[in-house]
Amino acid sequence: MGQLSTHVLDTMNGCPAAGMRVELWRHEDGGLTPLKTLTLNADGRNDGGPLLDASTMATGRYRMVFHVAAYFRSKGHQLPQPAFLDTVPVDFGIAEASAKYHVPLLVSPWSYSTYRGS
């Protein structure tokens, strides 16, 4: 039962990144194909459950784009123009369509970290 999920934590404020916009893309034929755009819920996750589920998971290369500067500005933080981090693209591969893939992001206006979660 394959699935793809994400979870974003705002490390500056010590809370989930509620309201952050995230885009999911698939690398195909030398370009990117948009799959989904979502706004994270109060827990910093997708309200609709997995971004990809067993019926839509496929092996290949993907990209998630996290709209970091817009999120922090919406929380009232004054960022320089241009912001140090505007968007954070995370490119990753899905090698097994039947596996679970979790792409968490820990983020502030000046740094981020990601890993393959569980």
Image (spheres, rainbow, N blue to C red):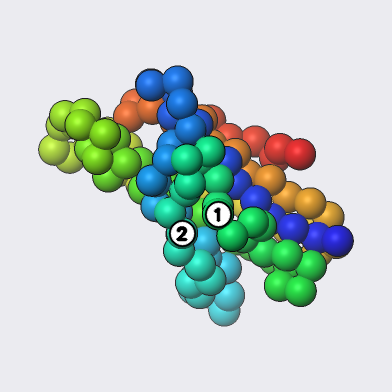
Instruction: Report the amino acid beneath label 2.
Output: Leu
Q: Residue at x 55, y 45 (%)?
A: 45
Residue labelled with disc 1: 47
For label 1, the crowd category at 10 Å Cα-Cα, with few meaning under 14, some 14 to 19 and many 20 or more, is: few
Q: Position of residue 96 (x, y in %)?
A: 83, 60
Helix, strand or loop under label 2: strand
Please tell me which residue lies in front, 44 or 5.
Answer: 44
In the drawing, what numbered circle is on residue 91? Answer: none
The answer to which of marks 1 and 2 sits earlier in the sequence is 2
Extreme-bottom residue of the structure: 29
The reply to whether residue 4 is in sight is yes
Q: Is residue 26 above or below residue 40?
A: below
Residues tagged 1 and 2 counted as in contact (Cβ below 8 A): yes
| Residue closer to the observer: 28 or 54 | 54
In this rendering, is residue 28 above or below 93? below
Quick check: 89 above or below 63? above
Image quadrant where one finds the C terminus? top right
**Mark 2 = which residue?**
38
Q: Residue at x 68, y 45 (%)?
A: 102
Tell me the quadrant of the picture where the N terminus can be found: bottom right
Which residue is drawn at the image coordinates 34% and 26% (left, top)? 110
The CA distance from mark 1 to mark 2 is 9 Å
- The amino acid pointed to by label 1 is Asp
Local secondary structure at mark 1: loop
